[in-house]
Image: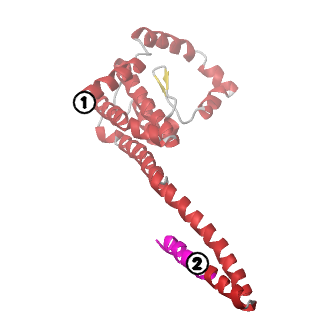
Amino acid sequence: MKKSELKNFIRENIISTLSEATEEEVKAQQELNKELEKTIDLKKDAGIEEAERAADKFNVNVFGYQTKYYKVCPGAKAFMDKVMAGGYGDMSQKQNEVIRIAKLHDLLFIRELRALKDPNYAKSVISEAEYIAEEIKDNVQLLGIPVADVDYVDNHIEIIKDAAKKVNEQDEKEPSDDEIKKNKSLAKAAEELAILTREMKSLAKKYSKAEGQEKEDLLKKLKSKTKLKKELDKILDK
């Protein structure tokens, strides 16, 4: 697949994921937020608001979209908190764009989490992750926000690449068929050598006590086994 085709494929998948929040849903969320504001004082009195913040201190509510995987990147949370606090200006008229950026972060982080568990997945998703990171930077720039403020996404690409390297490490550790055969041959030779050595020791004892023809027969056997022992030694020395 050409690089341009890969990018189009990735873009379509990302768009299908990002399309969850329509303009109608955003407007509905705005109306809901107005109703929720009426209960703020009651929640404070009951200590509920503080408990909710503590329960999901790693994520951010971005105009109704609740981020999910920002725990892996405190920098992303700090960035999005700043966006929502007006640190880059009023974004109330650019809610869809901000939600898109928030979702793109989640798409990158979920891939990173999977990559850390599965080196093969990490290897297959590098191009996709790089594209998502580029999209985050492009969308941030379109909002007039310094791209340098999201440079942390590059670190997450490196994490995925490092995870992918483990595939090669695993391949290096796995012996080839030839190596397996060789190891089996060596193991068999070592076993035969051990048995042969014991037999030769036994024959040597008998030889020292034997006389006449028996002694000559034992000597022939010892010579034959000595030749075999040298062959086995040669195999093990390779």
Q: Which residues are magenta?
A: 222-238
Where is residue 226? Give x, y as percent. 58, 80
First reached walking from the N terminus: tag 1 or tag 2:
1
Residue at image x 62%, y 27%?
49
Give the labeled residue for mark 2: 224
How many marks are shown on the rendered structure? 2
Q: Amino acid at mark 1?
A: Lys
Where is residue 72? Give x, y as percent. 50, 40
Q: Is residue 83 above or below residue 222?
A: above
Horizontal side, residue 219 vs residue 16: left or right: right
Horizontal side, residue 221 vs residue 81: left or right: right
Image quadrant in which the N terminus is located: top left
Is residue 50 visible from the viewing direction of this image?
yes
Please tell me how crowded label 1 is: few (under 14), some (14-19), or many (20+) other residues with Cα within 10 Å. Answer: few
Q: Secondary structure at mark 2?
A: helix
Main secondary structure type of the part rendered in magenta: helix
Give the labeled residue for mark 1: 2
Where is residue 225? Give x, y as percent. 60, 77
Dots 1 and 2: beta carbons under 8 Å?
Answer: no
Residue at image x 30%, y 34%?
134
Q: CA distance from mark 1 to mark 2?
A: 67 Å
Q: Is residue 232 magenta?
A: yes
Q: Is residue 130 magenta?
A: no
